[in-house]
Amino acid sequence: MHEGPQRISKLPNSVALKPGMIVSNEPGYYLPGHYGIRIENLVAVRPCGALEGTEKPFFEFETLTLAPIDRNLVQPGLLTPDELDWLNGYHVRVRETLSAAVDAETQEWLATATQPLAP
């Protein structure tokens, strides 16, 4: 992530994450000299429920960006079941949230773009 002063990075950081902060989640893969791909979403820091066996509160992230991830670029067989569940759940949220805000033609495209992927 590039925002600051808070960050999730290998770089030094002196600002702790707090509920309400927004950071970017930017997983990517780069093959030097060939290509790269990055998916970037904004996420909000929020408290998470009590976790068994922990001594202090933990935070989790709520994805704020709602845009389909191009299914043509995903190889479902390379995803873990949890990763596939996350992607399919994210697409359900995108479709359900945005459908009412777009015209019929875009709703049709959105329905196709957010279809579940099978393993």
Image: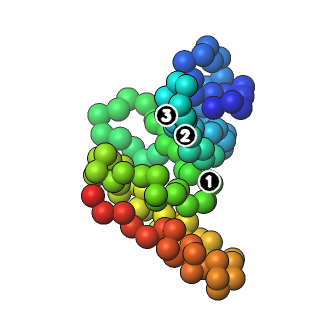
Secondary structure, mark 3, is strand
- Quadrant containing the C terminus is bottom left
> Type of residue at label 2?
Ile
Dot label at residue 37: 2
Measure the alpha-carbon separation of dots 3 and 2: 6 Å
User: Which of these two is toward me, 35 or 9?
Assistant: 35
Q: Which residue is mark 1?
A: 64
> In the visual, does 75 lie left or right of 110?
left
Q: Mark 2 or 1 closer to N-term?
A: 2
Packing grade of label 2 (10 A; few <14, some 14-19, many >=20) is few
Packing grade of label 1 (10 A; few <14, some 14-19, many >=20) is few
> Type of residue at label 1?
Leu
Residues marked 3 and 2 touching at CB (< 8 Å): yes
Secondary structure, mark 2, is strand
Judging from the image, the colouring scheme is: rainbow
Secondary structure, mark 1, is loop
> In the visual, does 26 lie left or right of 79?
right
Is residue 95 visible in the rendered image? The answer is yes
> Type of residue at label 3?
Tyr
> In the visual, does 10 lie left or right of 103?
left
Is residue 100 visible in the rendered image? The answer is no
Residues marked 3 and 1 touching at CB (< 8 Å): no
- Residue 101 x, y percent position in the rendering: 69, 77
Dot label at residue 29: 3
Task: Identify the residue shown where x is 63% and y is 46%.
Answer: 42
Q: Mark 3 or 2 closer to N-term?
A: 3
Q: Residue furthest bottom?
A: 104
Q: Is residue 77 above or below residue 66?
A: above
Measure the alpha-carbon separation of dots 2 and 1: 20 Å
